Every structure is written in structure tokens, then in C-alpha cells.
Amino acid sequence: MDSRPTHSRPAWLDTAVFYEIYPQSFADANGDGIGDIDGITARLDYIQDLGCNAIWLNPCFDSPFKDAGYDVRDYRLVSPRYGTNADLIALFHEVHERGMHILLDLVPGHTSEEHAWFRRSAEADHNEYSDRYIWTDSWIAGGDGLPFIGGESPRNGTYILNFFKCQPALNYGFAHPKHAWQQPALGPDALTTADAMVDIMRFWLSRGADGFRVDMADSLVKHDDDGKPYTIRTWQYMFSKIRPEFPEVAFVSEWGRPCESLEAGFDMDFYLDWRWDGIPNGYNMLLRNVDDPLSRDGDLSYFNADSETPIASFLEQYEPQLRDAERLGGTFNFITCNHDTARIAPRLSEREIALAYCTLFAMPGTPFLYYGDEIGMRYLPLTTLEGGYVRTGSRTPMQWSAASLAGLKAGAIAHTDDETSAYLPVDPSADAPTVAESRTRDDSLWRIVHDMLHLRNETEALHARGTFTALSRGRLFAFARSSGPQRVIIAVNPSRHSERLQLPEGDFTEIFHIGDIDVSGNSLNMSLQSFAILRD
Ligand code: NOJ
């Protein structure tokens, strides 16, 4: 089977800037306390005005919501709490009317335990869904090192989990089956699962979706080898089916290793927030190199003015992965935050956040801005809701205006079946940022994000594919980006002292800055906590 991807990456990705929407919390059109699809449609002009031209929508499908919708009960049905399939199709239409694009969230590795496929697979008698999930062959068998559940169904077997208890793993097989119940990756049953997932993609793509962000894309095949060769071939198989039908659609993986994900056929991958046992990856080193999301104590993040961290250690990890992405024709993307990650406010100051986001928006790849980050919405220490745990504090309602906040504060503490309560509490502080207030101020974070995104959109060298060359690797981080004859230099000084950059040959003019900067002769002088973009 030769199923290597032969597609070329959709051209619209070169200039895409994504806005991530957590539907529960973004905009509530019908006033029942929880966000909905019509609310998103009503805010498209806002998103476009901010400078974003694409959307990643977190799962919006029918679900018991034990993992905020990542436990899908019906892939083909919009959850009634968000609206109807017709509402989502109308959203696609409105997005396209504005020249924008939208990705849905595809969860291919597991379903909810309430999905009809799983209910059928749990029956004692063999049927067409018996092998859709990974079942052992005895009620008392262990999972060969994988998490498993027993004692819950008529079937004489235990089943393997992918994430939470509510999320049984779909069967994409094992790299090297060693028990009778383990089926081979790319074998007939594994490919039947893959075909079923392709059908789900087809369902939404044929109705106007522009592609998918793919959940846990690296973990389909169990006990895969280093480098994930069997999972890669499984994706190549799926892409060989779907790409020819929809050549303009885009796929971004939750994978975190572009040398694998792009080989598998994805267009883009994320630099994920992975800080295990206190050991940061390059992305964490920038923004989130700390144990407690609310404390600056011991925070070694590069953008923390007090950290003294040089950019060199980030670059050491980042540059080889950037080169992998370039070699494989895809991109390795930065996020401001996401629904799994702690927001950086209030730990970092507004100035620190502005420097961080402007730097991320100037880097290669396609930026993803998480709703509310443009106004510096804060992480709140909340108890869990719908499987959120520590992530809950980054999922609170979008702070549109003082009036809407007051309305939400007056509601109950968390979403219950009471239709009038808000999904989650809102920021109780008197100075909680709002979109309405931020838009009135020339010096607000919203204004900086807006201006920076518009500049990026107009400047080809800053687009996804512009080249990247680091020029300074100390506390001062400077880099050149170019596309054709156009060259820009980006420099950021997050520290509390001034810094100076020796400029390469050229005739540079400043086109964007934060803080005091000055170009004289061949040097760029940067005051404390400043940022500059110069054009040659
Ligand atoms: C990653 C998603 O981003 C996260 O929110 C979810 O809980 C897990 N995958 C399981 O689907």
C-alpha cells in the first residue's frame, strides 16, 4: 500500500492567523448562560477586525461533557447546547463570506463511552462494532501496560482507555501485536476504524468546514515504535483518502514533533505546552517555566523581566524543529495559550505579555491566539468543571464588557441545569479587562495585538513561510525574517536594563515598536522591556 501524501499545502495557510474559540465560554446569543454557535457568528466581525482570519473551534459535538466535549457521543451532531447542525453550517457560510476559514476539532483516538459504536462493541454477541475499540479477550485480563476498565459490560473482556475513564480507545491496532486480542496496525480492523474516521471528516468537510485540529494525533497505534512509524502510516492512509476529495482543507496536529507529524501528512503542528516534572521544553522556556501558574516565584520564563534567562536555550530546541518543518513543507506553530494551558496573566505583567505575543506573532509558522488573550484575561484558581481540573481557570467566559460581566457575576457560580447561570465564574476583580474598555485605549494590550497582527498581515516577510535567522541569542533576542527581496528585523528586550543590537548591513527604518527604541547608524538601542520591528 503506497499511501504517502502527495498534496501541496493549502495556500491560504501562508497568511492565516488563527483565533481559538472554546464554544462554552465565548459568546452566548440565546442568554442561557453558555456560549453557542450563533454567538460566534455574531462575533466574526470582531475577530476579523482584531486581525485574525481563521478559527479553530474546540469540540462542539453531542457529548456527555465529562471532558468538555473531547468525549464525543455523536460526531455528526452539534451539541444542542450550542445549537444545530444548520447553525454550524450557517457559521461556515458567514466565515467564508468574510474570506476567513474555520477548523473543527477532530477527536480520532477515542469516543465517549456513550457513543453508539461503543455501546454496540460492548455487547456479548459479535457484531460489526466488536473490533471498533480495543478489547481484551477475558473479563479479568490486564491491558498490557495500557489503562483498562473491566466489569462494566456484558462482553467477556476488558477495554483500553485513551485518556479519562469515559474515553475508550478506538482500535487502530498495535505496532507489534503480542496477544491474541491485539490486532495489527494497518490490518483490516484498524483500517475499518480509519475509514470510519475519514467518513466523519467527509461529513463536515462536505458541509463547509475548512479542516481540523486533530486531538492526540500521535497516539492512534498502541505500543508504536520510536518515531511513531505505524501511526504515521495510518495518517498517510487517511490522508490518501480525504486529501484528493478536499485539496484545500488544512490539518493541524496535537503532536508536538514536526519531524513526525508533517511526515504523517499534517500541514502544521503545535509547539505544545509540555513541562513534565519541572523540565520545560522550548515553548515553556518562553512563557510558562514555572510550577504555579499564579506565582512569579522561581519563574524562569524568558519574558519574565526578572528571570535573567537568555533566549539561547529556547533556540537550541526550536531551531532544529523549525528546520524539520521547513524540510517537510509544513509549519511549527506557536500558541498564546490554549484550553489546556494556564493563561499567563496575571503572572506576567501587561508589558511582558505584549512583548511575548508580539514576538510570537513575528515568528515563522501560523500563530494561534486563544480567545481573551488579546485583552489579557487572567487565569483564575477554580475548582473543576466538566473534566477541566487545573485547566478550568483558563476557560472562563469572554469578558466582552463591564455590563456583560456584571450580568454574569450576578448569575450562579457555575453552570448547572439552571439555564440562567453562567458556564463558569468570571474574573471578580474590579479591574478585570474587557474588550469594550480595551478598544477605547491607545495603549491597551488589545490595541498592541491588533496593530501587530495587522502589520504581520501586510508584511510578507512576517508570514508563515518567511525565513528565520537568529541574530542575537542573549537576553536580547533578535532575528531576521525575509521573503523575496523583503527583509525585516525583529528585536525584543524583556529585561530591566537597556540593550544594544549591532545591525547587519542595510538601511533600516522602524515600523513597529513598544517602549523606547532608537536606530542610529548601524545600531539599535533598546530601552528596558522594549520591542521593535525594522524594515530594510
Ligand atoms: C487534548 C485536548 O486538548 C484536551 O482538552 C483533552 O482533554 C484531551 N486531548 C483528551 O481528548
Image (cartoon, rainbow, N blue to C red):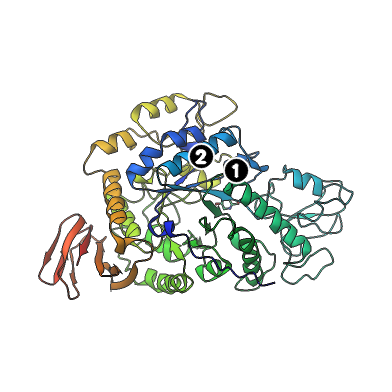
In-image side of 198 versus 27 (left or right): right
2 and 1 marks in contact (CB < 8 Å): yes
Q: Mark 1 packing: few (<14 Cα in 10 Å), some, or many (20+)?
A: many
Labels 2 and 1: the sequence-earlier one: 2
For marks 2 and 1, give the CA distance.
Answer: 10 Å
- Please, which residue is most extreme toward the left here? 521
Q: Position of residue 296 (x, y in %)?
A: 36, 53
Q: Amino acid at mark 2?
A: Pro
- Given residues 483 and 467, the one toward you in this image is 483
Q: Position of residue 273 (x, y in %)?
A: 48, 58
73, above or below 260, in the image: above
Task: Locate residue 133: give its quadrant.
Answer: bottom right
Q: Position of residue 359 (x, y in %)?
A: 31, 59
Q: Position of residue 485 (x, y in %)?
A: 25, 70
In-image side of 120 versus 284 (left or right): right
Q: Which residue is mark 1?
A: 69
Q: Which residue is mark 2?
A: 23
Quadrant of the frame with the N terminus: bottom right
260, above or below 530, in the image: below
- Given residues 90 and 385, the one toward you in this image is 90
Residue at image coords 49%, 72%? 328
- Please, which residue is most extreme toward the right here? 125
Q: Amino acid at mark 1?
A: Gly
Which numbered tag is attached to residue 100? none
Residue at image coords 36%, 43%? 48
Quadrant of the frame with the C terminus: bottom left
Task: Locate residue 218: give its quadrant.
Answer: bottom right
Q: Mark 2 packing: few (<14 Cα in 10 Å), some, or many (20+)?
A: many
